[in-house]
Each structure stands twice: as C-alpha cells, then as structure tokens.
Image: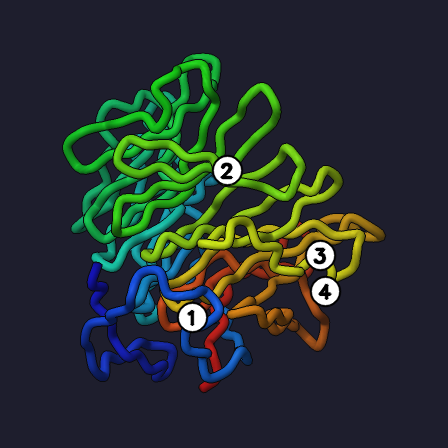
Amino acid sequence: MHRALVVLSLVSFGWVTLAHGEAKAQHGSAFCKHPQPASAQFFQSSLSSIGPLEWVSAVNDFGVVAGGIAAIAPEYRSHHAAVWVSGKVTDLGTLGGIRSASESLNNRGEVVGNADDSNDTPLPFIWSRGQMRAVPGVAKGYAYDINDFGWVVGISFDADWFARAFIYNGQTLTYITSDPSVYSNASAINNRGQVVGSMRTSNGTHAYIWERGKLTELPGLGGNNDAAFGINDWGDVVGKSSDGVVDHAVVWDRRGAVDLGVNELFGSGTYSIALSINNRREIVGVNDLIAPVQGHTHGFYYYAGGLSILSSITVNNTTVIDQPRDINNFGLVSGNGASNATEWRPWLWFPIP
C-alpha cells in the first residue's frame, strides 16, 4: 500500500503543505527496528481556543481533525459531528434527528460515525464531499472507522441491541462473523482491508483480526477481557488484554501479544488501553487509575520499547485529565482534556523535532 504523505507546518494554527511524496516500507520488518522518531517530546494546542470544536475523535495525515460541536438546538443531546481544517469548522449535520457523532476519518477527508434519524434511531453514516448518508443495509448501528479506499467498519444492532460487526466496501455489506448469535464489534480497518475488534464467546471477550473472510482470535495475557482498537498498514494491532485482574495496553505483532508496560509505569493500581498505532509504529493510549482516584486518566506514548507519559495538559498551571485518541503518520496526536468530568476541551499534541 502506498499512502500519500505531506510535510506539514503549523502557521497561525493553519496547516501549510510544503512537500509530498510516497512512503514505502517492507512488510514484516521487526517492530523494534523501525527508525526512531526524532523526539518523543510534544507541545500542545487547544483547538477550542481557535474554533468551536468541543471534542476530537481523530486526525488524518493532512491535519484534518474530526470531532464534534454543540448545535444551536437546546436539547442536551444535540451535538453534531464536525471537521476542523486550518481553523475552520464544518458542521456535518444529521440524518434527520438532533444528534450526530464522528468516530474517524480517512486521508480523503471522508468521515464516519453515527447520526440519529427522525425517529431518534442511530445510524452509521459516511460523510463525503459535503453529503452525509447512511451505510446501506444497517437498520441501527455505529460506524467506527474508514480506510483510504472508503471501506467502513462498525456494528449493526438488532431490535434488542445485540451487536454484530460489519464491513462495508462501498457496494456490499458483510458481517465479520457468520454466526448471528456471536456478539461482535469492529473497531478499525487498515488499507489492506484487515479489520480488528472484539467478540464475545462462552469464555469471555477476545480480540480478533479479520482478513478476506478469515477470522483469527488474537492471543492474550491469560485473562478473558481482550479487545483490539487500532491497526496500521503493516498489520500491527493495538488494544488491551487482561491478565485476569486488570487490563494492560498491548500490541499484537509478529511476536504475539506484547505488554507495553504502561501499568508498571503508572503503578499497579492502574489499567491501560492502547488506542492508536501509525505506520511508524508509534502508539498512543491512556491509563486509568483504579485507586485512589478512579477515572483520572493520563496519556502515554510508546515506540520501539520506549515508553513515556505523554506531556500532560495544563490549564492555569493545573494538570487536567488527558485522553489521546489518535496518532497520524507524522506523529501528530489528537485527543481531549478536562479539568473535571464536564469541562472537556479538544487538544492536539505536536511532536517537537
């Protein structure tokens, strides 16, 4: 796969294209032998200071950010999916209801998520070229990711909210599992058409990878509460795996499930989740303190065996909760921060060269 790349510069909070080319790499290269990024240090910018974006879900290689805004309607659920480009925010609207939410976007600027119809039923949507449309064949559900070819993954619900993972290739809707009694979720898809997520079986919840109709369960750390949340174009998968007591952030590569060591960095009273991995094999995720203050999360950055705490957001010299969501192929991290559970703000972490 060749992904179009651009060298980007931040000028007055706007992205300026300097050069472009193609990135090439050899599939199967060792996870720990990829070239080290220049620095794991970051500085932060609050998107809420330059536009009405209220939260962030993803960022693509061109610096386009998917997120959400508060709509004009007074209803408490009236947030709308939105995209941010060079300081300008575009409201993506809904499918006839009062609410929509973005989950991801690709390098063509196409956005996926879920939006209510006029009956307040959530539908998976694709937003492209200024138009929002529902994923055909899904009566109720969410879309979670889209690759650069426009293939979409997500979940479809039945009348009792039983979920089945799906992939939509622009023409055909396919369920990841042929058995309709298996509860499953699809979280991410790469440009090779590999899909990752989780499925519930008789002995717990397990992470999987799906490719060309073949479903493979990913090995865990010994517990029964695993899930995959991200995949890069080399097939490296990130997520969480339980040791039987707490969840650990892991990467699944050619060595199997590798504990990233986040719980040990933050202390034994934590659980952690790896959420996103780019083609340079940089990983971001969150840890959550179980004690003494549950819900106080911090972000982490991992590369080639090196783990560090992602530089914490500070507001008025006070460290706030920070939750990175995505990292693009240039190391730009998007996420959200809050001084408490109700005051969330969108942020970007820029790698310092």
Q: Amino acid at mark 4?
A: Leu
Q: Amino acid at mark 1?
A: Leu
- The CA span between labels 1 and 3 is 24 Å
- Disc 2 on helix, strand or loop? strand
Within 10 Å of disc 3 (Cα), the crowding (few <14, some 14-19, many 20+) is many
Q: Return the residue at label 2.
A: 207
For the question of whether residue 324 can be seen, the reply is: yes
Q: Which mark is residue 240?
A: none
Q: Are marks 3 and 4 in contact (CB under 8 Å)?
A: yes
Judge whether 272 appears above or below 131 on screen: below
Q: Are marks 3 and 2 in contact (CB under 8 Å)?
A: no
Q: Return the residue at label 3.
A: 263
Q: Residue 163 at what x, y percent from top left?
A: 44, 23
Q: Quadrant of residue 260?
A: bottom right
Q: Is residue 125 left or right of residue 31?
A: left
Q: Nearer the viewer, mark 4 or mark 1?
A: 4
For the question of whether residue 97 can be seen, the reply is: no
Q: Residue at x 20, y 72 (%)?
A: 22
Within 10 Å of disc 1 (Cα), the crowding (few <14, some 14-19, many 20+) is some
Q: Residue 241 at what x, y percent from top left?
A: 61, 44
Q: Return the residue at label 4.
A: 265
Q: Return the residue at label 1.
A: 332
Q: Residue 273 at what x, y percent from top left?
A: 59, 51
User: Which of the marked residues, 3 or 2, is nearer the chain's N terminus?
Assistant: 2
- The CA span between labels 4 and 1 is 23 Å
Q: Quadrant of residue 279?
A: bottom left
